[in-house]
Amino acid sequence: MIVVMGAGGATGSATLRSLAALGASSRSLSRDPARLAAALDAHTLARTAPLAADAADPQSLRAAFRGAHQLFLTMANGPHQVRYELNAIEAAVDCGVGHIVKVSAPAAEPDSPVAVSRGHHLVEERLRSSGVTSTILRPYAFMQKLLLLAPGIAAAGVVHGATGRARCNYVDVRDIGDAAAAVLTRPELAGGTYPLTGGRAYSHPELTALLGELLGRPIRYLDLSPSELHAHLVARAGMPDWLATHVVEIQQLAVAREEAPDGTFLHLAGRAPRTLEAFLGENLHRFR
């Protein structure tokens, strides 16, 4: 039995769909299981049992994990993420779960320049010391997050950033789901640490050129300083301060550390990752 925690989020729901496509059964956890069930397609819902659980309530986690063999752990970035993930690990260990697959992040290091990645490092270290077999997925930027740029592009034809010409890796969240399903259903893959990227890294100027070509109109990239980007994200995009800081930090990480495609997804899934061109083409109406 596989338990999917964070089932209502982008990565968790993608993993549920991928598991269902392989014929695997799961329990899917949510604070609102009825809402989760309503959001799932019929095929996926037939292969999963939505259950109520709250990462802030260890007792509810123990009830949900009872009898489970594997846990897929993904949580939204936020101020309480580390505490919630540690709650899940402790409950899983107590319940005898034998394999935990955690969604982490690049640069999950104790001195990482990205605060969220330092938190992932703490959770990874606890997972490694737990005695449970652990598998770490480290996806780069989600293609789906580019949809947050759509209003600004549709209204003014502008993308704001602070990366200069540094290239960023992008990965489709559906591919993360397929990678997760692979490590959950193929025991020989358990225990590894797997970076996940798309097939090509893009600079912001290259991204805007691609969007302009697809849309048939010019799209500009406005390169800002880190402090200017932070101010823009808070004042114009309405982001909370911690999230704006996170966006700036991951963009500066791309500047400091060259990002390039990695072949791990092909190894896990047996196919090439989805392309950014295909993703943007599917969602082009959002940018018009």
Image: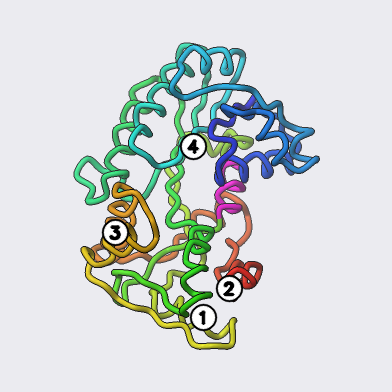
Is residue 178 located in the magenta-colored stretch of the structure?
yes
Q: Residue furthest bottom?
A: 217
Q: Position of residue 104 (x, y in %)?
A: 41, 42
Label 2 or label 3, whichever lies nearer to me, is 3
Disc ID at residue 74: 4
Label 2 sits on residue: 277
- Crowding around mark 1 (Cα neighbors within 10 Å: few <14, some 14 to 19, many 20+) is some
Q: Quadrant of residue 122?
A: top left
Q: Gap between marks 2 and 4, in whole Å?
A: 27 Å
* Among the two numbered marks 2 and 3 on one chain, the one whose residue lies closer to the N terminus: 3
- Residue visible at 55% across and 58% down? 172
Q: Which residues are magenta?
A: 173-182
Circles 2 and 1: CB atoms closer than 8 Å: yes
Label 3 sits on residue: 248
Position above or below: 238 against 80: below
Q: Amino acid at mark 1?
A: Leu
Q: Position of residue 59 (x, y in %)?
A: 49, 12
Q: Gap between marks 1 and 4, in whole Å?
A: 31 Å
Q: Gap between marks 3 and 4, in whole Å?
A: 22 Å
Q: Amino acid at mark 2?
A: Glu
Task: Describe the colour scheme in one phrase.
Answer: rainbow
Q: Along the horizontal axis of the image, is 78 left or right of 252? A: right
Q: Gap between marks 2 and 3, in whole Å?
A: 25 Å
Element type at mark 1: helix
Element type at mark 3: helix
* Among the two numbered marks 1 and 4 on one chain, the one whose residue lies closer to the N terminus: 4
Q: Position of residue 131 (x, y in %)?
A: 40, 20
